Image (cartoon, helix red, strand yellow):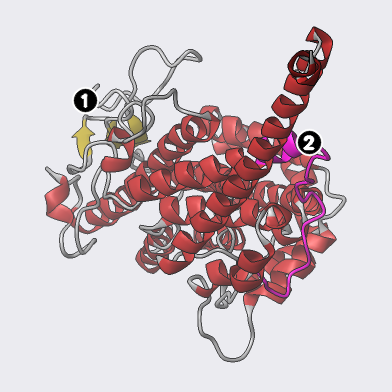
Amino acid sequence: MNNTANKKEPLSWWRRALLAMVLIVMALLTFLILADYLAEKQLGDEIIKISQAGEPITFLDLQAGFNQSSEGEDAAAYYEEGLFNLLRGDLGNLSKVNTFYRKSIISLPANQFPGEIKEKVAQSLATLQPVLEKFDKAGALPLSRFDIGIEQGMKVCRTSLNCAQTAAFLLSLRTLHLVMQGEDDAAVDSAITMLKMTRILDSCPTMILHTAKAVFVAYACEDIHLLLEHAHPSEKSLARLQEALSQTMPANSLERMFFAERVYQLERAKNLIPDNIASRFLQDKVADLPEQFSLPSSRWGRLRVRRKSAQYLRDMAELIAVAQRPWPGPLDDTVANLPLPARKPGELLSSGAVFIRLTAETVALVRCSILAIAVERYQRQHGELPIALEDLCPAYIDSLPLDPFTGKKLLFSRDEETYAVYSVGANRLDDGGSTMRQADESGPQDFGLRIRLRKPQ
C-alpha cells in the first residue's frame, strides 16, 4: 500500500506538451542569442581583416590615397562655387541644346547651322561666363580632395551630382560652340576643363559616382571626336589634350570604386558592428550618415542583417581581389568564374560584373581617344596617316595603351575617308572597327572612335 502511494503519477499530456514547448522556446532563444553573437563577431572579424590588410575602411583612409600635395590655391573652392551657382541650372534644356548641337555639327555644314540657335547659345554662355571661369580656374589647379556629398548622405550627393551633370552639359556645349565658331584652341581648352572636372568624383568614387564619371568622360570623348573631325587646333593644344586624357582614368580606377563603395556601406552600418570594433577601426570625425542602417527590433531580424552584412564584405573582398588584376582579368573572373562557394552569385557580385564592364568600356574609350589624337598629330607632320599604331611611338605617345577587353594592343583601320582606333569590345571579336550598335546590342560590338578625314580646303 505505502509503495503504491509513494509512486508519482505521470504528467498529463498537456503538461508534457507545455514543458516541451518551454524547452523548445528556451533552446530557440539560446540559439538566437548565440547566433546573433557569432554573426556580430563575424562582422567584426571582417572589419579587422580589412584593417590588417591595410585597405581603407573610412572616408579619411580612402582619401589619403587620393590627396595631391599642393601649396597655395586648391581647385576645391572653385569647384564648390561653380557647382553652387548651377544649383538651379536647367539640366533638361542644356541636354536638348547639347544634343541638337552635336547632331547638327555632324550633319550640317557650318554655314547652314541655324544662326538664331547659335546666338541664343552665345548669349547663354556669356551669362554663365563667371561660372565657366570658376571651372577653368579649377582645371588649372591641383585638387587635394573633394566631397561631392557622399559623406553627408545620398540625398545631398544626388543634389551635388545634378549640379555636376549640369556643369558637364554646359562645358560640353561651350566646347561644341567654340568648334562651330572656329575657335579651335579655345575648344581644346574647354574640353580639358571638362576632363579635369571629372576629378571631383574621384575622392570617394562609389558605384553611383563612378557611373556618373563614366558618363561625363564619354561626353568629353564625343566632343574630342567632333573636335578632331571639324577643328584644327595647334600641335601644342593637341599635346595638352592628350596629356589631360591620359590622367582621366587611373590604372586603379576599378579597385578604388570597390574600395569606396565598401567604405560608404561601412559608414552606413556602423551600428551593426560590435562597439569595440567600431571604436578601434571605424571612428573618424565625419558624422554618421543620415541613411544609416537601423537595427530591427527583433533578435532574428538583427541576426539576418548582420549575416547579410558579413556576406557583403566577403563578396566585396572577392570583387576587390578581381579588380586588382590587370585587364582583361577582371572581365574574365566576374560572376561565373569568381571563386565562390556552391551558391548563386548575390546582387553585389552581379552588379560588380556590370560595373567592371562599364569601367572596361570607359578605359577603352579614353585610350582610343588618346591614340586618335596621336594619329592626328602624326598626320599633320607627315601629311598622311600612319600605317600602324606602332608608328606613333615614341614621338607622339610613349607606349601604346592596351585593349582592356583582350590585354593586347588596340586596333587600327583606315580607308580613303576615315580611320578608326578601336577595342574589340565585349564579344572579343574584331568586327573591323564597326562601332555603331543597335539598341539591343546586336550586330558589331567594336568600341572606339571612327574619325572622318578632313577634306582639303
79 and 206: which one is in front?
A: 206
Which labelled disc corresponds to residue 430?
1
Q: Residues within 10 Å of mark 1 (few under 14, many from 20)?
A: some
Q: Residues within 10 Å of mark 2 (few under 14, many from 20)?
A: few
- Residue 306 vertical placement versus 112 (above, below): below
The location of residue 219, given as percent across then percent down, is 55, 43
Say which residue appears at 49% left-offset and 63% top-offset.
48
The location of residue 105, given as percent across then percent down, is 55, 35
Which region shows up in magenta? 283-305
Which labelled disc corresponds to residue 92?
2
Say which residue appears at 35% left-offset and 13% top-offset.
443
**Kind of residue sitting beneath label 1:** Asp
Residue depth check, mark 2 versus mark 1: number of the one nearer the observer: 1
- 367 left or right, relative to 38: left
The location of residue 284, given as percent across then percent down, is 68, 73
Q: Is the residue under label 1 in contact with that under label 2 (CB below 8 Å)?
A: no
- Quadrant containing the C terminus in the rendered view: top left
- Residue 85 vertical placement versus 336 (above, below): below
Say which residue appears at 56% left-offset and 29% top-offset.
108
Q: Secondary structure at mark 1?
A: loop
Location of residue 71 (image quadrant): bottom right
Q: Please, what is the dominant secondary structure of the magenta stretch? A: loop
**Kind of residue sitting beneath label 2:** Gly
The question of residue 300 being in magenta is answered with yes
Residue 114 seen: no
